[in-house]
Amino acid sequence: MTTSTKAEGRRLNGRLGPIGIVFMVVAAAAPLTVIGGNMPLAMGLGNGAGAPMGFVIAALVLLVFSVGFVTMTPYVPEAGAFFSYVTVGLGERVGKGIAVVALIAYTAIQVGIYGYIGWAINDTVTHYNGPVIPWPVYSFVVLAIVAVLGYRHIELSAKVLGVALALEIGIVVILDVVMVANPSPAGVTLSSFDPAVFTHGTLGIAVLFALTGFIGFEATAVFRDEARDPERTIPLATYAAVIIIGAFYAITVWAFVVALGPDQVTATAEKTLAGEGNMLLDTAGDMLGTIGRDIVNVLLLTSLFACVLSFHNVIARYQFVLAGKGLLPARLAGVHDNHESPAFSSVVQTVTAAVIVGVLAILGIDPLVGVFGSMAGIATVGMVVLMLTTSIAVLAFFLRGRASGPLWTTRLAPALAVLGLLGSLWLVLSNFTLVTGGSATLSTILAAIPFVGLIAGALAWRPSRSLAPSTN
């Protein structure tokens, strides 16, 4: 490994445009994974045929959040996303705490996906009468591939993710069209968006599982140093990511309501949750035939792979930025001489993930409920805390008069985002056992981890240099 010895003097660089960054972020959102996993949960445990509205509400909350986030971007001229924004807006101590929360949240969701993809590959192999192999074996194979791609220049990852994402979205669009063209006896109904329908059941649970589908969307700012014309690229990529992800989810979930019928989606989702079927794959089989089902199954695996690769890249860059600020060993801020990537940080991230996955495997934790469910729960709480704190930081930054701008973008939108995210945090915490699938005691412990990280980071770390992002 050849990395620059002047770790603190080099920055990452690249030529990523809005499209390349959006690929990275939408891939992290794993659209097909969300449709296969979050949709049945939102319908079966939430508000049934009204679930599409949960995804619309989640997208609107994040779109409002993005207004302040984007408005503050010119005053945070370096990568680091939430950490950098909070440091500028609320000071070093809170910034340190948020840095820990970010690492916890992203590491948790990445480990969760490793558990999920290990299970999914084994399930696919056995479906075609292949041998039963323990899920950790598949997880470590995927981890090794991610390690190679993450070590190299970011544009290689972007190309791989671009191909995987294009195929993933393509098959879902085809499925959506076929489902709407072949509706249930109820016809092409818009009842999902009728207040009488989407307020029936528990709308909050639908919003909760919709929010988990957006984890990683703010990573547009993490790739700042590798973006072409970041002042223009980052805002465009952020808005595009939220709108594309939100529209994709809402339309696809609505198409399932049309295909199955408003009066049948809840029962179908409940069967999936009970292990008596697979809402996504069974519907794909009915609409696209056996070959279509097989294609969706394969693309579900590529969706999971794209997701875990994206999170690997995001974590490696978080570590890179934190090391450059003295919060982590300086070696993590090294840039590879040939690949111009945070190579050493990438290797450390690979080792960290391997150790955690290995420990969970040795303990015999179930890959879905135990690994994916619990880790997704931690990540969801962490991400809402990150966005809430960032919105408060944006509001504080502009209220102190450190910069000026339109009232809507500098004050009203950030204030509305704070209210929306406080409501979202309440929804997540009050329904947390549904996210983790564990007991109230276990769920409480898991939910507390991001908050403990926030406090520990703020109190324990003593940086040797200023955390404030440079404006030079």
Image (cartoon, helix red, strand yellow):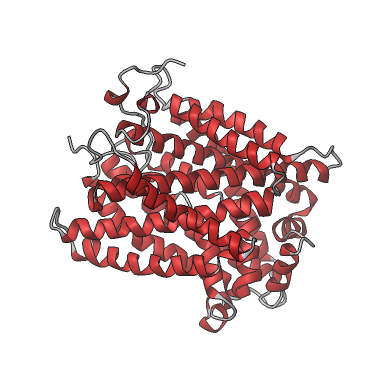
Whether residue 227 is visible here, answered yes or no, is no
Point out residue 31 in the picture as x, y percentages from the top left corner. 56, 52
Whether residue 472 is visible here, answered yes or no, is yes
Q: Nearer the viewer, residue 7 or 212?
A: 7
Q: Against 21, is 324 above or below?
A: above
Left or right of 375? Residue 11 is left
Q: What's the residue at 66%, 52% (across, down)?
A: 370
As drawn, which residue projects farthest toward the front?
460
As drawn, which residue projects farthest toward the top?
2
Exactly how many numbered labels are in the figure?
0
Q: What's the residue at 52%, 50% (across, down)?
A: 29
Point out residue 101 in the picture as x, y percentages from the top left corner. 42, 49
Quarter of the C terminus within the rendering: top left
Left or right of 47? Residue 153 is left
Point out residue 195 in the picture as x, y percentages from the top left corner. 51, 81
Q: Indicate the quadrant where residue 179 lies.
A: bottom right
Q: Nearer the viewer, residue 413 or 326?
A: 326
As drawn, which residue projects farthest toward the right?
129
Q: Against 88, is 327 above or below?
A: above
Point out residue 160 in the picture as x, y percentages from the top left corner. 54, 34
Left or right of 51? Residue 72 is left
Q: Nearer the viewer, residue 34 or 334?
A: 334
Q: Indicate the quadrant where residue 439 lies.
A: bottom right
Q: What's the residue at 69%, 58% (across, down)?
A: 280
Q: Against 72, is 182 above or below?
A: below
Q: What's the residue at 72%, 34% (across, down)?
A: 137
Q: Nearer the viewer, residue 104 or 45?
A: 104
